[in-house]
Amino acid sequence: MHELGITSSIVAIVEEAAKGRRVARVTLEVGALSGVMSEAIAFCFDVVTEGTALEGAKLEICEIEGRARCDSCGAEFATDTLFALCPCGSYRLTRLRGEELNVKSIELMEAA
Ligand SMILES: [Zn+2]
């Protein structure tokens, strides 16, 4: 599964940022045009975090709506796919937003 590798990379990034401390919560931003299924990431998260600093951490996923601009008429609109048609009939679209796949924030456990 594609998302398993992505989830592993995310966990590695967070572990590095946490520098050995336990992680309580991870918030991700996933764009609608990133090609990544957030459900699949959530599914992989529990498996991948086992035995890491993220074990038991909560995962929150913020989905970011995709936006595109038409190269022909300049209209901007929301879309979940780049295979959309502009109302003017053009299919030449430029992605403005929605390819994000970011670790937005990390919450560490309080030191006991
Ligand atoms: Zn157009």
Image: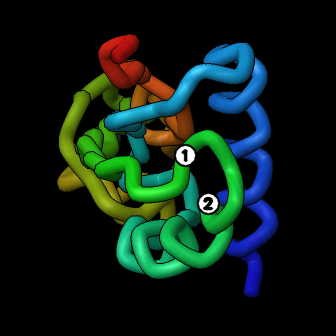
Disc 2, SS = loop
Q: CA distance from mark 1 to mark 2?
A: 5 Å
Left of 21 or right of it: where is 108?
A: left
At a point 80% along the width and 66% down the height, the residue shown is 5
In the shown orientation, is residue 91 left or right of residue 65? right
- Which residue bears the numbered disc 2? 49
Q: How many marks?
A: 2
Q: Quadrant of the C terminus?
A: top left
Camera-side residue of 79 and 54: 54
Q: Residue 25: x and y, percent?
A: 33, 36
List the residue tagged with mark 1: 54
Residue 91 visible in the picture: no
Q: Amino acid at mark 1?
A: Leu
Q: Residue shown at 41%/45% (left/top)?
A: 31
Quarter of the image where one finds residue 51: bottom right
Quadrant of the snapshot with the N terminus: bottom right
Residue depicted at x 31% and y 15%: 110
| Mark 1 close to ligand 1, CB under 8 Å | no
Q: Secondary structure at mark 1?
A: loop
Q: Between disc 1 and disc 2, whose residue precedes? A: 2
State if disc 2 and disc 1 touch (CB < 8 Å).
yes
Q: Is residue 107 left or right of residue 45?
A: left
Counting from the top left corner in percent of width and height, residue 14 is at 64, 30
Q: How is the image coloured?
A: rainbow
Q: Residue at x 35, y 35 (%)?
A: 24
Which x, y percent locates residue 75? Answer: 24, 29
Return the x and y of residue 52 as percentages of the image width and height. 69, 50
Q: Which mark is residue 29?
A: none
